[in-house]
Amino acid sequence: MYENLYKMAGNVAIPEEKREEFNQHVLQILYKGGIRKTEQVELDGKSVTVVGRPVPDQQGIVSFDYSIFEKKKRETATYNTNTGKLIIPDKGYREFGLVMSLIMTMQEAYSKGQCYLMSKDKPCRVDGYVAIIKGMLGIDLDFSHRAKMWDMLLFLKNIEEYENVTAEIIWDAYSFDLCPFIPEQFFAVYSIDSKEIPIPEEPFCGEKNEIKDASAGKLKYYVYQIICRLVEEKREEGLEPFLKKLLDADLSGRKALAEDRVYGTIAEVSLYVLPSVIVHAYGAALKRDFWDVWKALGIKGYSEIIIRKRARRDTVDEEERWILPFYKVILRQNEDEFLEFWEDEILHFSEDMKACLSDWEQRFQRIRLEEEPDIENYLVQIVADLDRDWGCCLVDKAFITEFIEHKNEDSYKKALLLYREIMDEDTAYFPELTKKQAIRWMIRQNRYEFDFTAMSAFQSLLTNHKHRFEILGF
């Protein structure tokens, strides 16, 4: 039931000059979000399933089907680096689905055409996703399309699936810190779902040449009063044809219509407000629903108006922009599962993981190569046992590849011996059983939950060259 909860409305169109930057961000989100691609590799004469970082193929298509944080394989999804298109047949609603929503949030922010992240049948707030992306990539996003609230509402209303979207829903989706506030756009959606026009504290009652200085709220009520008088005086017969012409006219056309002796004042107002303001006043005067009137007029609506005062954008210092750590969003208490992504920053490790890192350092130094392990055979067994016996996430292909390339080096041999020790811990307490029997019958169900995390974490450490050298010395 949650598979299609989040989706995009409209078409994503990443500008050519931004495409490379955007693609790199998407690849980083996939990587840091734990999204991988499964594949088969030949190892010691056996085919084993591993995962690798999603990267573009020769056609520029990035494929992925696995979440290391869910330990779950899904149907293959794709991202097209040439077009920015994301195809997700099996999104889910956990870690995999979250990462897909992060990418869709990026698509909305970067797209030069109108497109919006939707939750069911209404626009989804993006503040939280932006805070996660800020934590992952260190970048700030803005959403210029959402700043144009009237354009957003009209765009969604013209899509059958979203025809029930209201002005209030659009306002709820507005993000103060992520886009500028445009008064003309706000007043274009303000109260249009009401059949009544708000009465200003000081209604406008000036001359035609003073209209340019009046607020949008006052002008709406002013037009409403004009139309009400026309109706009362039974002079509204030509008003609807005039409005049809006016509301689809460009700025110069509306300036010409402002010279009309009967309806010219309404045309003068249209120079400074978006068309919904006039349609709302017209509908209220006739006691009709705004959208019924809009559809009956059969208009697309003009978009160019005279901006009397440029909207000021309140900037937010980069340091003050909200950051939401990914590990907290996926309900982890710490970053024990994030050793692979450990760079220069200090991760939030549990006390157990800190103890493990110290323990692994000491144990690695004590290991002596009294036997010459068959690296490929060791790797096959480790891959199989992590999956079948311990239910850990699939092993990284980079781990396999590196250890095969260095199979004759003692440090790599010692690392695998230590890995085997970690996995086989406590089996010595059951000498009457084989190791597999001891693990499956006795140890697995009684082992501390952290131990399963530690087994995967050790593999992540082995692929993290910087911190592997600090802890294991190679």
Image: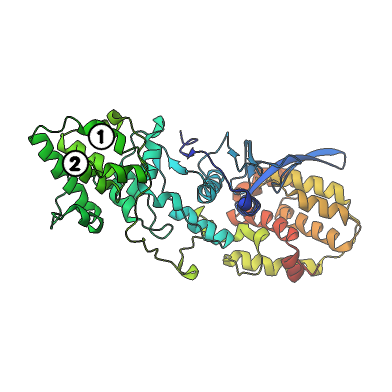
Picture quarter containing residue 151?
top left
Disc 1/disc 2 C-alpha distance (Å): 12 Å
Three-letter residue code for mark 2 = Arg
Residue located at (64% from left, 42% from top):
66
Residue on which disc 2 sits:
261
Residue on which disc 1 sits:
242
Crowdedness near tag 1: few (<14), some (14–19) or many (≥20) residues, C-alpha within 10 Å:
some
Three-letter residue code for mark 1 = Phe
Nearer the observer, 235 or 71: 235
Crowdedness near tag 2: few (<14), some (14–19) or many (≥20) residues, C-alpha within 10 Å:
few
Give the secondary structure at mark 1. helix
Can residue 19 be seen by looking at this rendering?
yes
Nearer the observer, 337 or 229: 229
Quadrant in which the C terminus is drawn: bottom right
Residue located at (58% from left, 60% from top):
137
Badge count: 2
Would you say the residues marked 1 and 2 are in contact, meaning their CB atoms lie under 8 Å apart? no
Residue located at (15% from left, 55% from top):
206
Q: Position of residue 241 (x, y in %)?
A: 25, 31
Nearer the observer, 226 or 109: 226
Q: Position of residue 260 (x, y in %)?
A: 23, 41
Residue located at (66% from left, 66% from top):
343
Q: Where is residue 399 in the image (x, y as percent from the top left)?
A: 77, 53
N-terminal of the pair, mark 1 or mark 2, is 1
Nearer the observer, 320 or 443: 320
